[in-house]
Image: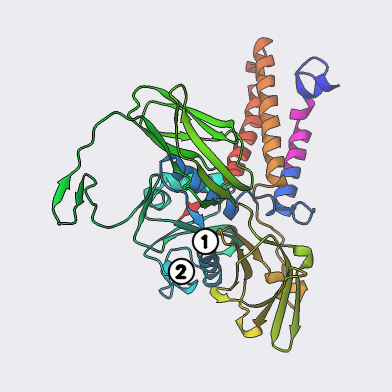
Amino acid sequence: MIKNCFIPNKRNRYKPYLLRKIAILVYSFVLVAVNSFGGLLGIEQAEASSITPANIIALTNQERSSMGLNTLNTNSKLSAAARAKANDMFEKQYWDHFGPNGETPWQFIRAAGYNYVYAGENLAKGFKTAEGVHEAWMASPTHKANLVSANYKDIGVAVVEGVLLGKQTILVVQMFGNLTSEVYSSGGVVKSIEPKDSTTTKTSTQKVTTVKESGDIKSISIISPRSDSIVTNPSVPVKGAVSNISGEYTVDIVEGGKIVGSTTSDKSQWEVKKESEWSEGGHKIKASVKGLGVTSKEVSFVLDSKSPTVIKDTLDVSKEDSTYKVSFVVDGEWETVSLVLGNQIKEANYSFDEEKNLLTLSVDESDVQGIVSLVLADKSGNTSQLDISEYFVENSSESDERLFPVITLNLGDKISIGIVSVVFFLLCIEIFIYWKNGRLKDSLGDVFTVGLWWFVLTIAIFNGFGGSLS
C-alpha cells in the first residue's frame, strides 16, 4: 500500500496515489484552510515568529563582532523610542523614516530621554524571520552603514504587529545611539581628543626627554571583554592581541584552570569563540600562548543576559474613575519601567511592594491612545517589551474582528513548506521511474500539470518570506 502511494507501478497504473487529482485537491484545500483561516482553526500565528527584539539585537552584535567592532548595549530608552515610532506609523498609516506631519526619528529618541550625540534608525516590514530582516539590512548600503557604524554604543529594537496601509504586517524598528562623542572599536574606546606621543615625557624643568625603548618582549593581552565590565551577550567572544610573536600561534582561554576555548592566528590580533555560552554570573579569564609560557593579566567580567519580564498571569488592570491601575509581578531584577502610550513615551508613576515583588502603575485615561506597552529594563540594559493594549479595551467583542490573521513563521508555514516539499519529492521519484521504464514521453502531460501546480504554489508561499526596508 505504501509503495502504491509513493512509487509508480502496475498496481497503481503508474500514478502514485499521492499525486492523483484528488490528492492535489486535498493539498490545495489544506493550504487554503491553514493559511487563510488558521486563526479560526486554533493555529497560533504570531507567537512562533522568530522576529523578536532579542534575536534582532543578537544578529546585529554577531555581525559587529565578526567585523571587529564593539557589541551594542540594549538601551531601554531607545527600545521605548522604537516602540513609539512603530505605534506612530500604525496610527498615522505611513511607512517612512519621516511622518506625514514632519515627525522624525530623532524626536522619538529625545522624547524617550535619550540625549544622543550620534543616532540612527533602520526600518523593516513584512519579513518572516529575524535572519531575513538582518540579511536584507546587510544587503542595503544605507542600512548596513548603521549596523556596522563605530559611532554607536547603544541599541533599541521594537517588533510590533498591526495593520499598515491595509495589510496585516510586522514592523521592525531598530534605533542606534551614543550619548558621547567617543567612537568605539574592538580595541576599546577611542576618544575624540588630540593623541599624545607616548615616547616623550615632560620633566619637572619642562624639558622634553625622548624615551628610547629596546628589547623583544613577547606579550598577550585581552582587549574584550574589558575588565570589570558587564556583558549581556552569552555568546560574546574573547578578543585580544599579541606583540613580538611572529608566525602562527595558538591562544588558549583559561578559566578556573580549564581551557574553555582556543584559536590559531598568524596576525597580531586574535578572537576566541567559546564552544558553549557563558553562564550567568561572574567570570575570571586569562589568555595564554601555547608553548611560549606567555600569559595575559586576568580579566574579570559579569554576564547578565536575563531581561526582567512581566509574569502575565499576575497582570491586572482595573479602572477607578478616570485612572487605570496596572499591577504585575516582575520576574528578575529591574531598574526602570516605561509606558509607551500610542506614539508617546511617559515615565511611569509607580509603587513597588518589595515583599511581593509587585509593581503598580497609575495611568490616566486621557493618556491611553491606541497601543499601550510596558518596557522594563535592568541596570545592565537588558530590556523586555509587552503589549498590554487588550487590557484597556472595554468592549472586548470589538477588540479583534479580523478573519485573516497575519501569516508568519508558524505552524501554518510549516504545513505549507511540508506539503510542497513532499510533492517535489514525489515528482522527482515519478520522473525517475518514468524515465527508467521508458514511459516519460507518454506521461509528460501529467507531470507538467502537477509540476506547474507545484511551481506556482511554491512561488506564492516563499514570496511571503520577503519584506521591505525603509
- Does the magenta run of residues contain 106? no
Residue 139 sits in quarter: top left
Q: Which amino acid is tagged 2?
A: Tyr
Vertical position of residue 198 compared to residue 84: above or below: above
Vertical position of residue 63 compared to residue 219: above or below: below
Residue 150 visible: no
| Residue at mark 2 | 114
Q: Which amino acid is tagged 1?
A: Asn
Q: How is the image coloured?
A: rainbow
- Quadrant where the image shows the C terminus: bottom left
Circle 2 residues within 10 Å: few <14, some 14–19, many ≥20: many
Q: Tag 2, which secondary structure?
A: loop
Q: Is residue 2 left or right of residue 312?
A: right
Q: Is residue 234 left or right of residue 206?
A: right
Vertical position of residue 268 compared to residue 134: above or below: above
Instruction: Identify the disc placed on residue 75.
Output: 1
Vertical position of residue 286 compared to residue 190: above or below: above
Of all residues shown, which one is farthest toward the top? 437
Point 60% across, 66% down: residue: 335
Instruction: Identify the disc placed on residue 354.
Output: none
* Image x and y of residue 431, in percent: 65, 19
Q: What stretch is highlighted in magenta?
A: 17-28
Of 328 and 185, nearer the camera is 185
Point 72% across, 67% down: residue: 401
Circles 2, 1 touching at the beta carbon (< 8 Å) = yes
Point 76% across, 51% down: residue: 43
Residue 269 sits in quarter: top left
Of 349 and 354, nearer the camera is 354
* Image x and y of residue 404, in percent: 69, 58
Magenta residues: mostly which secondary structure? helix
* Image x and y of residue 416, in percent: 69, 41
